[in-house]
Amino acid sequence: MRLPDPQQRGFALPLALTTSALLLLSSLSLQTLALHARQRSHHALATAQTLDAERSVAMAFHQHAAGAYACLLALPYSEWEGSERCPGVNPALLESGRVADRDWKLLDWQPQGARVGTLQIRWSDGRQSRLDLELLP
């Protein structure tokens, strides 16, 4: 029986270890890519949900600012309480609300013309949003 050449002995173990390390690094890279894609997807979903909630607030504000409350839209928010221009109107309906399991509170309303203005709100999680609205009659 012929014995292998002494210089060729022991090549299988280093080859197996190198191959294992390469496979391990490849799988870790793939896992990192998958986690990064998941984070991007989660961020995109959160952004879309926030934009949807902001649109819902704008629609609710527009809906509640009809009728007797429409006179408030010509005034800045700081002048709403006790305004002689809108006697008997309680602005509380326009000052807060709930959209998609999130509460919001009005921080400011600044009219910028007839039925146009900037609405600033604070969400229940502490974030703030600023919405430029054009309220249709």
Image (spheres, grey):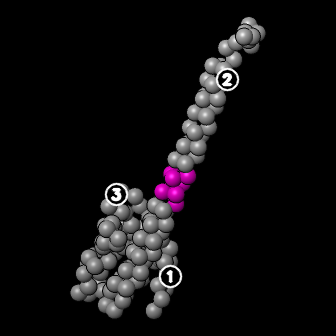
Of residues 117 and 86, the one nearer the viewer is 117
Q: Where residue 34 is drawn, which disc sits there?
A: none
Q: Earlier in the sequence, mark 3 or mark 1?
A: 3
In the image, what residue type sits under mark 2?
Leu
Q: Where residue 15 is drawn, which disc sits there?
A: 2
Q: Residues within 10 Å of mark 2 (few under 14, many from 20)?
A: few
Q: Earlier in the sequence, mark 2 or mark 1?
A: 2
In the image, what residue type sits under mark 1?
Glu
Distance CA(mark 2)–CA(mark 3)? 55 Å
Q: Where residue 134 is drawn, which disc sits there?
A: 1
Q: Please say if 50 is above or below 88.
A: above
Quarter of the picture containing the N terminus is: top right
Of residues 133 and 81, the one nearer the viewer is 133
Q: Which residues are magenta?
A: 37-44
Distance CA(mark 2)–CA(mark 1)? 70 Å
Indicate whether residue 41 is drawn in magenta. yes
Q: Secondary structure at mark 1?
A: strand
In the drawing, does residue 105 fall left or right of residue 110?
left
Q: Which residue is mark 3?
A: 125
